[in-house]
Image: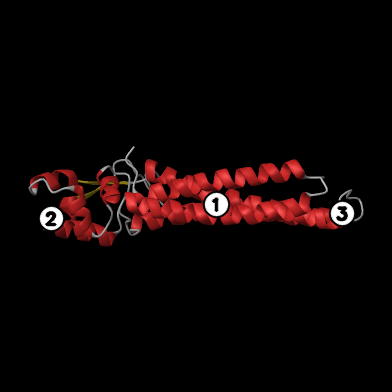
Amino acid sequence: MDLSYQEKSILGSLVAMLVVYGYYFAAVLHNVGQPEFIGAGLGRLFLAVVAIIVIEIVYHIVLALESKPEPKDERDILIEAKGYRNAYFALSTGAFLVIAGVIAAGLSRGASPMPVNVTLFLMANIVLLFMVVAEVIKFATQLLYYRRGV
Amino acid sequence: MTRAKIRNNIRRLRFDRSEMTQQELAQKVGVTRQTVIAIEGDKYSPSLEVAFRIARVFGLPLEEVFQYDSAGSSTSAP
């Protein structure tokens, strides 16, 4: 398949995000309710952020050596804008669900079996999950528009 | 209202101009080769500015490069 520089760049970022955050969220879910939930979770979060940055830098250096980088033209910018539009829907849905969760938690104050710090860390992870989902939707729909046409 | 299609003769015009490559046209117009491929395949309708630049490369008026295919579109009266 003949992929452009932009498509290769997006595909690499999509795979990196799925692998790194897939591993991170699997580990976080596995540790819910464990005593080391917050400590280990923060460590993994730091590692995930560093891993994404390192992978992106190395991948784009290799990509630049392998195929000549091309500046974005009007079609690339349009496709990127449509990707952001789709990501916005996912992010706003996540924000709405978190707000609903906070209100529900406030109404049932004291009913939660989890300590406050655990609940807050869990909530932070839910926000992060929706940010990652939004980014994945952006990358995936960009690749779709490149193939299907826009 | 269905989506209107803008068709073009770029592939034929490139062939008529000493088989100009997609890369050469892309460089003259200032877009990527992938965008030229998408325009030729009717997968992307370029902006007016890029359409005029393409027409200028071939030295033709816009209407001889791009055609508005209104057969598949219909508009409802207000």
For the view shown, which residue lies furthest in the right direction? Answer: A110
Give the residue number, with chain letter if any, for mark 3: A115
The answer as to whether the residues below labels 3 and 1 share one chain is yes
Quick one: A25 or A55, which is closer to the camera? Answer: A55
Q: Residues within 10 Å of mark 1 (few under 14, many from 20)?
A: many
Q: Which residue is mark 2?
A: B58
Q: Residue B12 location in percent, x, y?
A: 14, 43
Q: Nearer the viewer, residue A149 or A16?
A: A16
Residue A123 visible in image: yes
Report the colour scheme. secondary structure
Local SS, label 2: helix
Q: Residue at x 50, y 44 (%)?
A: A15
Badge 3 marks a residue whose secondary structure is loop
Tag 3, which chain? A
**Which residue is depicted at the point 29% across and 41% down?**
B71
Is residue B78 in sight in this rendering?
no
Residue at which label 1 appears: A135
Residue A124 appears left or right of B10: right
Question: Which residue is pictured at 56% across the width and 52% down the height?
Answer: A51
Image position, residue A146 (x, y; %): 38, 46
Circle nearer the viewer, 3 or 1: 3
Say which label, 3 or 1, has the lower sequence index: 3
**Which marked residue is nearer to the observer: mark 2 or mark 1?**
1
Please tell me how crowded label 3 is: few (under 14), some (14-19), or many (20+) other residues with Cα within 10 Å: few
Badge 2 crowding class, 10 Å Cα cut-off, few under 14, some 14 to 19, many 20 or more, is some
Distance Cα–Cα, label 3 vs label 1: 31 Å
> Which chain contains the residue that carries disc 2?
B
